[in-house]
Amino acid sequence: MILAIDMGNTNIKVGLVWDKDGEKINEERLMTDYNKTSMEYALMMMSIMDYYGVKKEDFDGAVLSSVVPPLTGVIETAVKKALGLSPVIVNGGMKMSISLDKFPIPKILGADLIIGAEAGFRLYKPPVIIISMGTATTLSLVGKDGRFEGGLILPGLKTSISALASGTAQLPEIDLSRPGSVITVDTMESMRSGIIYGSASQLDGLIKRMEAELGETCTVVATGGLARFVIPYCSHPVQMDEKLLMKGLLMLYNENKTA
């Protein structure tokens, strides 16, 4: 069993990967909190382990991806306290199937982009565009030869909602339930339709532009906690894979674990 941790700006995804092929993965989320100590994070990890009935002796290793540098060492120490072993930490200098030679300084590339690109390339027919929808929405492109061509970053769904609500006195926060018509006279419905249909249209347009620049049709796969709200409204075919990043973490762990 492997403990796989994907730390983002809003949430920390903690995955229990039960088998070497990643066929069974249980995933829970913790809030990213700069004020928590390594011991507090370790206790939360241990509570997840207790919930699933596993002990530290059941783990063969751990892997950590982080886009929050101030907390990387804290979570690394928490893993050591919870499991008694050091995690493999994802970075641009590790062994992987994809190539990062297009980037001037691969080691500073976001770990979340690396694991998404690695899993997308290995699990789907390239060229492949990987959409990850969290605090930010990212689109990454990996070519047929496994070269990470790059991508783009834009505000995430909830980031856009918060910005809209905080910047306008009469517009409230909204939930992400199913939108109604595109044309509506209700304020809440107008915001919901604008955010969801607008995000779907934005993704459709960006996919079209990326394919045009590459000169090829791409496989498109989406992941992230917010993807399920938007992807069903995209016109372009997009495959959903909620466990994509956990699968990528397992792949990179297997490539880089020490004997």
Image (cartoon, helix red, strand yellow):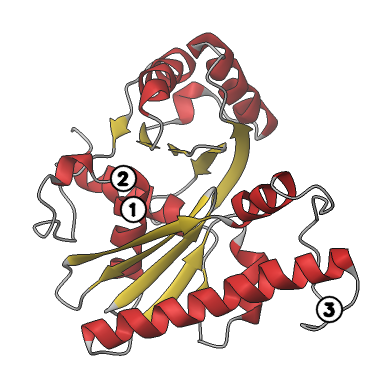
The quadrant in which the N terminus is found is top left
Residue placed at 22% from the left, 89% from the top? Answer: 215
The residue identified by callout 2 is 110
* Residue type highlighted by circle 2: Gly
Seen as rendered, the residue at the extreme front is 169
The residue identified by callout 3 is 180
* Residue type highlighted by circle 1: Leu
Residue 130 at x, y percent in the picture: 39, 67
- The reply to whether residue 225 is in sight is yes
Give the crowd class for mark 3: few <14, some 14-19, many >=20 residues within 10 Å: few
CB atoms of marks 2 and 1 within 8 Å: yes
**Left or right: where does residue 101 sit relative to residue 202?**
left
Question: On screen, 130 above or below 167?
Answer: below
Residue placed at 37% from the left, 48% from the top? Answer: 112
CB atoms of marks 1 and 3 within 8 Å: no
Give the crowd class for mark 2: few <14, some 14-19, many >=20 residues within 10 Å: some
The residue identified by callout 1 is 113
Seen as rendered, the residue at the extreme right is 186
